[in-house]
Amino acid sequence: MVDIGELLSIYTESDIDDFLKKYTGITLNEKNLSYEKIKKNYRFIGNSESNGSNIGQLTSGEKGVVERITNAIDAVIENEKSKNNILVAKDSKTIIKKAFPNFYSNMHDVMSETTDKSLAKDAENLVILAVNDGSKSNKPTLDIVDSGTGLSSYEFETTILSINHGNKLPRDKSYLIGAFGQGGSTSLAFAYATIIVSKKDDKISFTIVKRVELIDYKNMVYVYLTIESHIPNADYSNFISENEYLNRFINETKSGTIVRMVESEISKRFRDNEVTKPGMLGDYLNTELFNVGLPVKIIENRSQYKDNVHVQNRSVYGSLSKLKTSKKYVKKDYCGIINFEHNNHSYSVDYYVLLPTDETKWGSESECKTVFEQFNVYYDPIIYTVNGQTITTERYTKLNNAGLNFLRYRLLVVINLDVLESEKYKFFTTDRSRIIDSDLTHGFLDKIIKALATTEKLLKINEIVGEKSISSSIDKELIDDVSRQIKNEYDKYLKTGILLSSKPGHHYNPDIEEIYENQITSLVITSAKREFYKDENIIFIVSTGAQKHVNSEAVIYMYIDERAFYDYNTAFMNGRIQYSINAGAIKTGSHSIQYSYFKDNISYLQSDKLLFEVLSDKAPERESKNSTKNLDINIKIINESGLICDIARDQVNKKIDVKLCFENEKLKAGVFGFSSSSDEILRVKNIIIKPTVLFCLFYGEKYDNISEDDEKNKIVISFIRAFISCSNNNIS
């Protein structure tokens, strides 16, 4: 029998290879391996020889760590449910309250903001992440340890070694947080090998999972170790370790699991310092495990850090706990809640303003970014949570365009989708990368943005930060004069008076070279919006893929609320039909619309059903589309920003705000390096204001849709260098 001390002394690639060689005769690194050569000691993860594609779903190793930790938390919750004889639990809080009353009481006080300290108390050491040295500084070996249910050897295959087994998907498992179907197996792709040790019924079982290239298969596959065709047991009668958490697990814990990710790949950003330092792996976990219910203890075991005087092993409680207890950075005078209705659900959305303690630094984007990442390492201002986990985020663009253009890295908005109960899983894609655009979600974010942009607290702090951000290095009269010039030139360009070409929800506009069929191939409803005022025509476009004459002759029926509806006008075009319902023909409230095309008496096509709403309000008075007199362009020179040129296009108020930062380090290096004196640098700044703004405005959607600041800056710097070069050539 393998000694557990021998197994838990494995921390590096060579350790793994030596162990496997000793017990199986091969390391799995040999060339020309076939499954026939290894099948005596290895089986496929998930009992599938094509498991590589399923396991390789994630894009970063730290995501895999989160999957393992959520599994660990669920194992603890499941274990406590059984120990405390809880038959039914709607959510994890029911179990935590009974199992860990002291911890639960403290967290209740935290959430009600009657204490400013989060304490693990009787829930300490239940889930642990320890970061250990591998053979290379850029590939640490990670231990995820839980005091959960544990596994017997015969349970490994259907649980921790399965793929998409769906153990947590039944409704009676709603108290578990890991219900997204990806599972801990996705972490396997980011480790050289993974050791799994589990304790149950006074026995410890283990296996080792490793990626291997077999000549039988085109892709890499993942296999796990067996001895004599079974998950082996380990002898733990004489185990002693210098690591307290391992001693406690082996010698004291009744049941639980250790997952050791040997030589694991995680992003440089999160491993480049002590894990508990601001912005490091601890804060990544705070962001991801936003409000998961149980603390996770973080232990720094890497030799270059663990002996530091100030190193601290501490618990991660989630960013919500930090927001509730931070007096240093959370400015409560500007925090609050917005309430709104969407699709018959009531939502309460919390927003927080995070700023440095030194008020003179509120205008410093870099200082604010350093504060912000301690609560949200993704930097985006809006996060969605489900089961306490961060699911996805929204970029700053919409808030910027809505007028809150100085709150980047300062405003954090938390949208908890748990109010939707089981419907919440329809809100986002299966890989949790984005919110789905569906009838359930359409218009949801826009309502939040509108509410935030009209909140007095946020308008006030936006103004305060703006005042602290604006630079006085360039003459205000010059800026005002240039703004007027740009307004006049941009007005000419716009002609129609429509400010923005990037308005969401365009109608389908077939390309002129598109080939149209002599029959209708589909019915797809597209619409610029789904909310209509009671005194405006309701317009929908149905794309058909057919020629104009085919569309005009087709028998297509419109159904409103599943009843045939005829009070509309049609306009036929190649590829599409426009339907215009007369104002007032449909009563106020929510409705559904659907189209059916009858080819003959037997077969027909049917569109998807689309939801829309007729508002009780009349349409606001609009100015003539040909009038551009209210177009307003405001240019501000600011002291510090990650962007050289930041454009906010406020469609509602017909306003464009432009922030220019000429103190950007890359701009200094790439442009102002041509000049040595401060007078010459100021001269260059003055002459590039107008062309830079016009360039970014005319670049339009393409500029707005670039997500990375560095990419935008590269384009702007290239333009400025070309402009200066041309100007110098003209002068000479």
Image: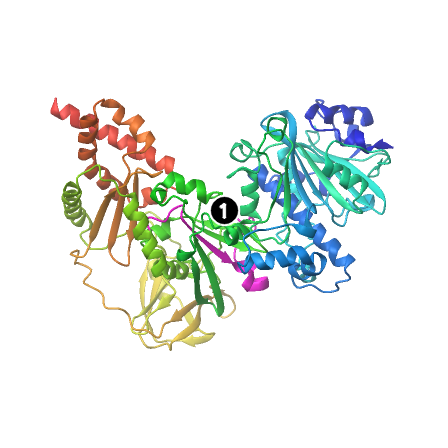
Q: Residue at point 17% right, 39% down?
A: 475
Residue 140, visible in the rendered structure: yes
**Which sits in the foreground, 462 or 314?**
314
**Which sits in the foreground, 586 or 23?**
23
SS of the residue at dot 1? loop
Residue at the outermost left position: 731
What residue sits right under mark 1 in the picture? 375
**Which sits in the foreground, 345 or 437?**
345
Q: Residue at point 24% right, 53% down?
A: 655
- Where, quadrant-wise, is the C terminus in this rendering? top left
Per the image, is 426 magenta?
yes
Asked where in the image residue 313 lies, by quadrant, the reply is top right
Per the image, is 335 magenta?
no
Residue 620 placement, left or right of 277: left
Asked where in the image residue 302 lies, by quadrant, the reply is top right
Asked where in the image residue 90 lies, by quadrant, the reply is bottom right
- Residue 508 in percent (x, y) is at 36, 55
- Residue 464 in percent (x, y) is at 31, 51
- Residue 560 in percent (x, y) is at 43, 73
Residue 481 placement, left or right of 700: left
Q: Is residue 614 above or below residue 23?
A: below
Residue 503, visible in the rendered structure: no
Query: Mark 1 packing: few (<14 Cα in 10 Å), some, or many (20+)?
Result: many
**Which sits in the foreground, 457 or 478?**
457
What amino acid is labelled 1 in the image?
A: Phe
Q: Residue at point 17% right, 48% down?
A: 487
Residue bounds of the magenta highlight? 405-433
